[in-house]
């Protein structure tokens, strides 16, 4: 009977459990820095840190995951995995990183099973799985929390592929349906899984030697499912305008960009140096890409030449070319021409081709008694020893937003994204002078960007330079008059300058522009209190408390507004609530004392004044004397 997969080479068949343990240990060493890494301010905020969709595992919340685009992405299963992380450990980044690493280890294990099934050669499968597992190009997919998309979609992708092999070999319909469901799960994790049906075609054509109608008929459900989810992804990306990046690129330009990316991925596979989180589009396409076109053609020719006469090599090359095609940016997507994470799936095919070529060379050099197997194992060990330290060092780059963006700036000092994101991190951590320098640099690269001006204005506010802040924020609003954060921050600057009417107007515009936050309602409420609009202040502060119950400052300020409206009972309730929430709230004690004075409850007033003094604050002499006199008069 003719075999459809490779023959056993006489090698011992190592139990998959031992291989998985080995992969786990090696990956833990290679990606160990991930356990000290935090979230970064690049997608992690949108997908995890500030994403209200992942805060609950209630059925209604899970349903919303499947009905919502997040930052232009339809990835409900990825978000569900984040929801599970959040339920288990909140926003502790270790939990999220550990999950990514675990999924990557499982993926490497399935790569081992897949390759061993296909070529029936344990040493080849071990080489491929370890090269896939510990190559430095894997760092972005594994250590960046937001790229859970990569490790999760590939988990389902490989599981579907292994299940389909069972169907292809034994004809089990259950395996076929299971493979279809797993493929759907892969698409719901990331739509880059669309290549799966063509991989099945390549598998059946080259490995199982199927032709004609039999080759295509059972791929139709996979193709239909792929088409539906692809359309969803394209719509989502268009809504986010990600696919509109580089509209000036003509079709020839895009082909040249694809050729440059093709050379890049092959180059970095063999020489993983000068890696970066950002590889932006060039300002001028021809000078950057045209010299690489001959290399791209030659490399493609070499790949096809290497695949001649050997069906396993043909499958490896087909796998690589099919899966790399969607990431070559023939249709530009996002602000990057290429990315380390894009090669996560295609690297499997390339690793298999490399292993097969090496195995063939070793077998030809030492044909007797399979000594090539020992050489292959030795080469695998050398590869791991060389690559693991490089991967380890690359993983340290993702420790936090500052280390990430400073690494980008080493090779790309004019990266607008890097300067803006680095400066935002510095701003959030109170390093205002450094942040201001970074925003100045970003503005010099691309002037008058809304976000840059708004963030620089906020930085100047933190430095107490309110007039300068108003100037930057006004420039930002000249570009986008309804940019809520800039409106809110300009209102804050006006408030600090004592320009309360201007502040009130900007707070109102900010709320109307979508800043429906407790902070916005609170700030306008306080401002209206200063303007003497106490009824309006009560309404705004009540709204703030509806959005964020238990906010001591909001209760305190609403209590002041009620006091000025002579609604002493309500004022007393708010001051009581503020003190209950914060027993050291001296101002609340002081103003509650005034409520007691107005309602002639002088003993309670004196107790509150004593509490204020115990908290280390000075009391107005006239107030103290008045309360003391009233108590003395009662004793007489």
Image (spheres, helix red, strand yellow):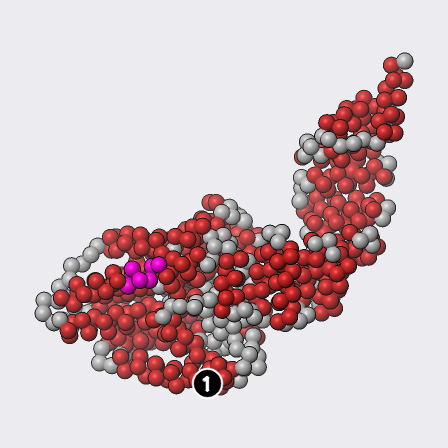
- Please identify the quarter of the rendering in which residue 348 is found: bottom left
Q: Residue at x 69, y 32 (%)?
A: 584
User: Residue 294, percent across and down?
Assistant: 39, 86
Q: Is residue 12 left or right of residue 107?
A: left
User: Residue 154, percent across and down?
Assistant: 38, 62
Dominant secondary structure, magenta: helix
Query: Which element is circle 1 on?
Result: helix
- Between 114 and 248, the residue placed more toward the observer is 248
User: Residue 518, percent across and down?
Assistant: 69, 49
**As drawn, 159 above or below 36:** below
Stretch in magenta:
383-389
Residue 431 within the magenta-colored segment of the rendering:
no
- Please identify the quarter of the rendering in which residue 502 is found: bottom right
Q: Residue at x 62, y 59 (%)?
A: 435
Q: Is residue 177 visible?
A: no
Mark 1 = which residue? 290
Across the whole image, how many numbered discs are drawn on residues? 1
Q: Is residue 37 visible?
A: yes
User: Residue 213, percent across and down?
Assistant: 31, 78
Q: Which quadrant is home to the N terminus? A: bottom left
Residue 388 within the magenta-colored segment of the rendering:
yes
Q: Which quadrant is home to the C terminus? A: top right
- Between 104 and 134, the residue placed more toward the observer is 134
- Please identify the quarter of the rendering in which residue 490 is found: bottom right
Q: Is residue 353 left or right of residue 191?
A: left
- Single out the residue that lies furthest toward the left: 368
């Amino acid at each position: 009977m003719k075999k459809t997969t490779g023959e056993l080479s006489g090698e011992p068949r190592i139990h998959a459990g031992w291989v998985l343990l080995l992969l786990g240990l090696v990956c833990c060493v290679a990606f160990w820095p991930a356990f000290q890494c935090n979230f970064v301010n690049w997608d992690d905020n949108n997908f995890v840190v500030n994403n209200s969709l992942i805060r609950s595992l209630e059925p209604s919340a899970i349903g919303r995951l499947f009905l919502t685009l997040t930052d232009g992405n339809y990835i409900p299963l990825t978000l569900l995995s984040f929801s599970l992380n959040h339920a288990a450990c909140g926003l502790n980044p270790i939990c999220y990183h550990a999950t990514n690493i675990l999924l990557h280890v499982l993926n490497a294990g399935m790569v081992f099973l897949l390759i061993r099934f296909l070529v029936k050669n344990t040493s080849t499968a071990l080489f491929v799985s370890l090269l896939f597992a510990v190559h430095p190009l894997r760092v972005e997919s594994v250590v960046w929390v937001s790229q859970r998309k990569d490790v999760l979609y590939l988990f389902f992708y490989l599981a579907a592929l292994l299940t389909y092999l069972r169907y292809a070999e034994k004809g089990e319909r259950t395996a076929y349906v299971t493979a279809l469901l797993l493929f759907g799960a892969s698409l719901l994790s990331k739509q880059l899984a669309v290549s799966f049906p063509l991989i099945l075609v390549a598998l059946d054509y080259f490995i199982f030697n199927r032709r004609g109608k039999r080759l295509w008929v059972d791929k139709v459900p996979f193709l239909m499912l792929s088409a539906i989810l692809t359309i969803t992804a394209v719509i989502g990306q268009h809504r986010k305008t990600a696919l509109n990046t580089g509209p000036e690129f003509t079709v020839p330009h895009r082909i040249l960009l694809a050729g440059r990316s093709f050379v890049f991925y092959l180059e970095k596979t063999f020489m993983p140096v000068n890696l970066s989180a950002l590889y932006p589009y060039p300002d001028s396409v021809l000078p950057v890409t045209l010299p690489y076109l001959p290399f791209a053609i030659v490399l493609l020719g070499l790949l096809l030449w290497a695949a001649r006469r050997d069906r396993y090599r043909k499958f490896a090359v087909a796998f690589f070319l099919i899966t790399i095609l969607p990431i070559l940016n023939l249709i530009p997507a996002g602000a990057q021409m290429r990315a380390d994470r894009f090669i996560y799936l295609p690297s499997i095919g390339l690793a298999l081709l490399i292993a097969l070529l090496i195995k063939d060379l070793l077998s030809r050099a030492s044909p007797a008694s399979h000594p090539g197997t020992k050489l292959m194992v030795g080469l695998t060990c050398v590869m791991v020893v060389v690559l693991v330290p490089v991967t380890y060092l690359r993983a340290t780059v993702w420790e936090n937003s500052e280390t990430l963006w400073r690494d980008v700036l080493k090779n790309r000092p004019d990266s607008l994204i890097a300067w803006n994101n680095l400066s935002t991190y510095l701003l959030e951590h109170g390093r205002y002078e450094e942040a201001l320098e970074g925003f100045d640099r970003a503005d010099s690269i691309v002037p008058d960007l809304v976000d840059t001006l708004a963030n620089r204005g906020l930085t100047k506010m933190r430095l107490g330079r309110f007039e300068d802040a108003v100037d930057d924020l006004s420039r930002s609003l000249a570009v986008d008059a309804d940019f809520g954060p800039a409106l809110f921050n300009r209102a804050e600057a006006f408030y600090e300058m004592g320009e309360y009417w201007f502040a009130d107007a900007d707070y109102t515009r900010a709320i109307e522009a979508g800043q429906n936050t407790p902070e916005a309602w609170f700030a306008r409420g306080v401002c209206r209190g200063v303007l003497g609009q106490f009824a309006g202040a009560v309404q705004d502060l009540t709204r703030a408390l509806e959005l964020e119950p238990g906010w001591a400052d909001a209760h305190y300020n609403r209590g002041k507004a009620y006091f000025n409206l002579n609604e002493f009972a309500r004022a007393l309730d708010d001051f009581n609530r503020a003190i209950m929430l914060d027993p050291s709230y001296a101002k609340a004690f002081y103003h509650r004392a005034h409520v007691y004075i107005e309602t002639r409850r002088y003993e309670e007033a004196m107790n509150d004044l004593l509490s204020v003094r115990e908290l280390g604050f000075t009391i107005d002499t006239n107030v103290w004397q008045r309360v003391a006199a009233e108590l003395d008069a009662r004793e007489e």
